[in-house]
Amino acid sequence: MPSPIVHVELVAADPAKAAQFYGEVFGWNLQHDPSFDYHMFSADPGPGGGFVKAGESGGVEYKVGEPLLYIGTDDIEGTLERIEAHGGKRLLPKTEIPGIGWFAIFLDPAGNKMALYTQLS
């Protein structure tokens, strides 16, 4: 199975302001999910994403200038095991996004913070 990049998170001190900037400059379609206070974008034909607030959340540090790329997988646990077997490190275990899917965050051997994502079927 291919493992495409399926979601991109851009870190900002003010996610709403960042979303407004990208919407106005690039014409990206914007949405806001008030239940998570999460601003999302779609930049067709590429992957969509969202804007996350800088700081710590769930034991993971989100820093401005460090976008987070999400790689699609049907098996987060199996993929995390392969990541660790090849020198990567699990930062955040498989975590549910209620009603949407699951994600996990890891470091690759070079120190890049990346994420995995599985959508609800």
Image (cartoon, helix red, strand yellow):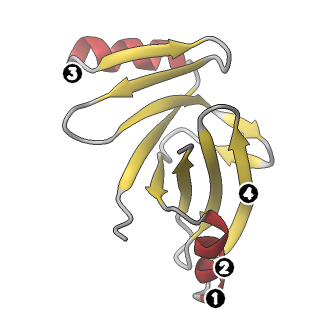
User: Residue, x 62% and y 75% (percent of image)?
Assistant: 78
SS state under label 3: helix
Say which residue label 2 marks.
81
Q: How many marks?
A: 4
Residue at figure coordinates x 62%, y 11% from the top left:
34
Q: For marks 1 and 4, give the CA distance.
A: 16 Å
The amino acid type, in three-letter code, at marker 3 is: Phe
Distance from Cα at disc 3 to Cα at disc 1? 40 Å
Percent coordinates x, y for residue 88 in the rendering: 62, 78
Q: Amino acid at mark 4?
A: Leu
Quarter that holds the N terminus: bottom left
Location of mark 3 (residue) = 26
Question: Mark 4 sits on what residue?
Answer: 92
- Decide which of tag 3 and tag 2 comes sooner along the chain: 3
Query: Dot 4, crowdedness within 10 Å: few (<14), some or many (≥20)?
Result: some
Contact (CB < 8 A) between labels 2 and 1?
A: yes
Q: Earlier in the sequence, mark 2 or mark 4?
A: 2
CB under 8 Å between callouts 3 and 2? no
Q: Is residue 121 above or below residue 111?
A: above
Give the Cα separation between the discs numbered 3 and 2: 38 Å
Element class at badge 4: strand
Task: Determine the CA span between mark 4 and mark 3.
Answer: 32 Å
Up-down relation of residue 117 to residue 40 (above or below): below
SS for dot 1 = helix
> Could you tell whether 5 is left or right of 108 in the image?
left
Tell me which corner region of the image, top left, top right, bottom left or bottom right, holds residue 75. Answer: bottom right
Q: Residue at x 44, y 20 (%)?
A: 18
Q: Residues within 10 Å of mark 3 (few under 14, many from 20)?
A: few
Q: Which residue is mark 1?
A: 85
Counting residues from the start of the chain, the first of labels 4 and 3 encountered is 3
Residue 77 numbered mark, or none: none
Q: Position of residue 97 (x, y in %)?
A: 67, 37
